[in-house]
Image (spheres, rainbow, N blue to C red):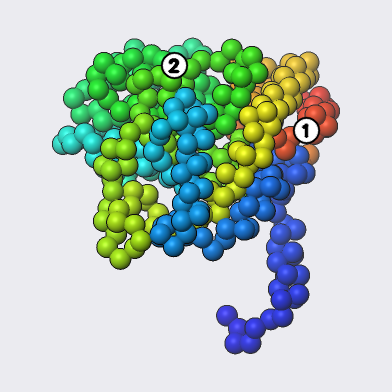
Amino acid sequence: MEDKGIPKEQIYQMLRKYKEKDLTHRSGRILGSMCTCPHPVGVKAYAMFLESNLGDPGLFPGTKALEDEVITMLGQLLGKEDVYGHIITGGTEANLMAMRAARNLKNVENPEIIVPKSAHFSFKKAADMLCLDLKMAELDDDYRMDISSVEDLICDNTVAIVGVAGTTELGKIDPIEDLSRICQEQDIHLHVDAAFGGYIIPFLKESGYDLPEFDFKLPGVSSITIDPHKMGLAPIPTGGILFRERKHLEAMAIETPYLTEDLQSTVVGTRTGAATAATWALLKHLGREGYREVATSCMDVTHKLEEGIKEAGFELVTEPELNIVPFRSPEITVEELAQRLEDKGWAVSLATYPRSIRVIVMPHLKAEHINDFLKDLETITGD
Ligand code: 0PR
């Protein structure tokens, strides 16, 4: 660190040099991200609340009121208006909180959780931090959680079962209805990881897509992760965790002697109110109609990509249920294909099971980007 400060214009110039090295979502070149260009209304709202700290909500009652309203709105979206939760940093923190609540509520000696093999790696972190034994359930032929495998893994020490609504690699929706029945019968916490799907499945259903139930309408569902910074178009970092009952938050509440609130259930202490303001602004500004438009546009582009991939002689590893298209080549390996696409300037991402290239058709990917991508794909195996 230098002794004398540098004038601000020079600082901004220096920063721009670093920023030039970064990819942007706007370029349409990022194909494997669940983030996207944040909506300008969310960006403005975020900037308005930069100094607000929800870790000490008594100082920021306005922001706290916004958080309460956001939680109610997200609850309405997910089938239950009176839910309890917080706006936090993302899916990882949400999943960690859900596992912590489930573990604390069911006081057993060697707690175990059951997740599908397709679950996001955040559950490995949660298991490690919370000293949980992680049991992986098999997937069925369509890469959804296999119910008989779940039933085989359940034991007296099972504190939570996790179903995913919109898996990270393939965008699949686990059979949450079956999981709900099992968890109700056996009094087990059912957590639904809808970090990705939470902001798209309800809007597609409203638009006539035939998708399964996955939310609080199912009586066995105890908590849901939903990320505004993914399909919700909010700036990073913005996550959401919702619980069916207040007891879930209370089960992990810690006394905070000198703050303006007595108890705190979030992992993070000082936490931004800006993410809450952005989420509130976007829910109000876009409304259901705006989000339906985002969801159906992404699916239209998804279908276009799907057809183009097949026409170019590549194979889909599974039919897309949401806006994620996984595919491979019958001629070259997935690694070789990824390399050739990267050489042409596409930032691709690989699914591990089944091994494939996965394109996540986020709102920043427009029809023209997909056309360019398909043109490159058509020439790629002949090289
Ligand atoms: N649950 C699911 C189903 C997810 O897909 C993810 C992240 C999480 C939880 C964890 O969310 P946070 O990363 O917000 O904590 N899924 C993507 C992944 O890890 C996120 C991502 C985003 C990846 C942007 C790449 C990228 O460029 O693959």
Q: Residue at x 74, y 64 (%)?
A: 16
Whole-percent x, y for residue 276 in the image: 53, 48
- Tell me if 78 is positioned left or right of 26 in this view: left
Q: At numbered mark 1, what does the secondary structure look like: helix, strand or loop? A: loop
- Tell me if 104 is positioned left or right of 4 in this view: left
From mark 1 to mark 2, how far is it between C-alphas? 31 Å
Question: In this view, which residue lies farthest toward the bottom?
Answer: 3
Q: Which residue is mark 2?
A: 175
Q: Amino acid at mark 1?
A: Lys
Asked where in the image residue 125 lies, by quadrant, the reply is top left
Whole-percent x, y for residue 17 in the image: 74, 64
- Tell me if 349 is positioned left or right of 179 in this view: right
Is 120 situated above or below 10? above
Q: Residue at x 55, y 32 (%)?
A: 196
Mark number displayed over residue 239: none
Q: Residues within 10 Å of mark 1 (few under 14, many from 20)?
A: some
Q: Amino acid at mark 2?
A: Pro
User: On the rendered image, what quadrant is the N terminus found in?
Assistant: bottom right
Q: Which residue is mark 1?
A: 366
Q: Which label's residue is closer to the chain start, 1 or 2?
A: 2
